[in-house]
Image: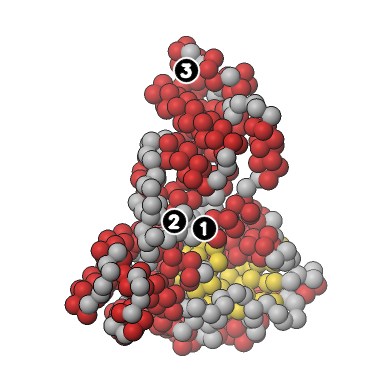
Amino acid sequence: MFDSLTERLGNTLRGITGKAKLSEENIQETLREVRKALLEADVALSVVKQFIDQVRLRAIGQEVMQSLSPGQAFVKIVNDELVSVMGAEDNSLNLSVQPPAVIMMAGLQGAGKTTSTAKLALWLKKRDKKKVMVVSTDVYRPAAIDQLRTLAAEADVNFFESTTEQKPLQIAKDALSAARKQFCDVLIVDTAGRLAIDDEMMNEIKGLHAEVKPAETLFVVDAMTGQDAAVTAAAFNEALPLTGVILSKADGDARGGAALSVRTITGKPIKFLALGEKIDALEIFHPDRIASRILGMGDVLSLIEDAEQKIDKKKAKKLASKLKKGKKFDLEDFRDQIQQMNNMGGIASMMDKLPGMGNMAQMAQEKLEANPFGQMEAIICSMTPGERRYPDSINGSRKKRIAAGSGTQIQDINRLLKQHKQMQKMMKKMTKKGGMANMMRGMGGMMGQQPPGGGFPR
C-alpha cells in the first residue's frame, strides 16, 4: 500500500531535505509536486487542497524559516499534516458496554465485509482474549452464510446458524439472545451488501441497528476504489451513526487515496487495515505509523508487534540455543525461518516497515515472485533428513532427485542452497554481534541485493 505515493513523495521531498535555506519559491515548487503526487494517488481534491494549504501556512511561517535544518523541518510538517488528515486521535474500539458488545459491519457487496468480520473476530479473540460470536444476516448473497461459517471455524470463534429463509431482523435478535446465553463478550453482525446504495438496503440496516444497538458500527470499504471509498462511506454515514472504517484489500492499493480521504470526508476514523486474504491479516490503523511509511521512514513499531504476535517463540529460542552451542544453521532451520517470515507477510512486508529501505521491498517481492516461499519449502521437504542436516552432501544426482520430487528445476535447487549459505553466514554474524544492521545485510544478501547505507529522510 502507498507504493506509488511513497515513491513520488520520496523523490519530491528528497530534493528539499538537505537544503540549508528555504525560500517561498522552492517551497511552492515542492508543494506543486506534492499536490500532483496526492492527486495521482486518487486522494479527494478537497482533501488535497486542505492538506496543501495547511502545509503552506506552516512552512512559510517561522517554524521552517528559523530552523537550523529547514529541509527536515519541512518534511516534519508534511508528516504532521499527513497524521492530521488521517486522524490523530485514539482509534481503538469502544467495547466498554454490558456484554455482549455488538459490532455491526456495513458496506457494499464485494467490499470484504464477511472476510473482515472473521478477521476482526480472530483479532479480538487473540489480542483482547474475548469470547466472540459471529452471525450473518445476509440472506441475499448466495453462500454468504456458508462463507462466514467456514471462516468462523478457521478462526475458532462461535458461529450462530442462520438460513436464507429467515428475516435479517429475526436472525439478529436470535443471535443476540444466543450470545447472552453463551456469555459471549462480543457479537459481530455481518450485514447484507448491495451493488449500490439503495433505500431498501438502508431501511433494512437502520432496522437492524435499532434492534441490536451496536457499540461499534464499522463501515467496510474496498481501499482499491480510491476516493470513491470516501464518498460511499459519507453516504452510509448519513444513514447510520458510523463509529469507524475498516479499509479492506489495502495490500492491493498502491495509491492510498482512500486512506487519505476517508477521515476528512466522513469525520470517522479508520480503525483497521485488512491486508491480504489470510484470516490473521488485520492491522490497527495508526495514522502516525502510516505517515512514516508513506514518507519512507518505516514502521518499526508495527514490525515489532508483528514479531511478538506471529513468531513461534519456542522455535526461535531453540534456534538461538543451537547457534550459541556452535552448531550450524541447517536446512531444517532455514525452512523454519521461511515459515516465520511467511507468517509475518514475507520479506517484502517486513522490509516495507524498515526505515530507509526505499524500493527494496518491491525489488525483493519481484525477485521472490520467481521463487516464492512455497516453492522453497517444497524443495526442502523433498530432501532426506540427512540432506537437510548436511546440505554439503547434496551432489548432482541428489539435486536431480530433489528437483523431480518438488516439481522444480536444478537451478532452483542451486538458488536455494546459495540463499541458505547466505542466511547461514548472517546467523553466524548475529550470534557474534547481533543487531538489525547484520540482519538486514543478511536479508539483502539472501535477495541478491545489498540494502542501501542510509535512508530517506535521515
Labels 1 & 3 near each other (Cβ < 8 A): no
Q: Amino acid at mark 3?
A: Lys
At x 42%, y 61%, the residue is 297
Residue 288 vs residue 228: left or right?
right
Q: Which residue is mark 1?
A: 300
Whether residue 80 is visible, yes or no, is yes
Q: Nearer the viewer, residue 393 or 81?
A: 81
Labels 1 & 2 near each other (Cβ < 8 A): yes
Task: Select label 1 or label 3 by which is in front.
Answer: 1
**Residue 254 image position (x, y, % from top left):** 35, 60
Q: Which mark is residue 16?
A: none
Mark 2 secondary-structure assignment? loop
Which residue is outermost to the top? 397
Whether residue 2 is visible, yes or no, is no
At x 57%, y 28%, the residue is 331
Q: Which residue is mark 3?
A: 399
Residue 85 vs residue 386: left or right?
left
Mark 1 secondary-structure assignment? helix
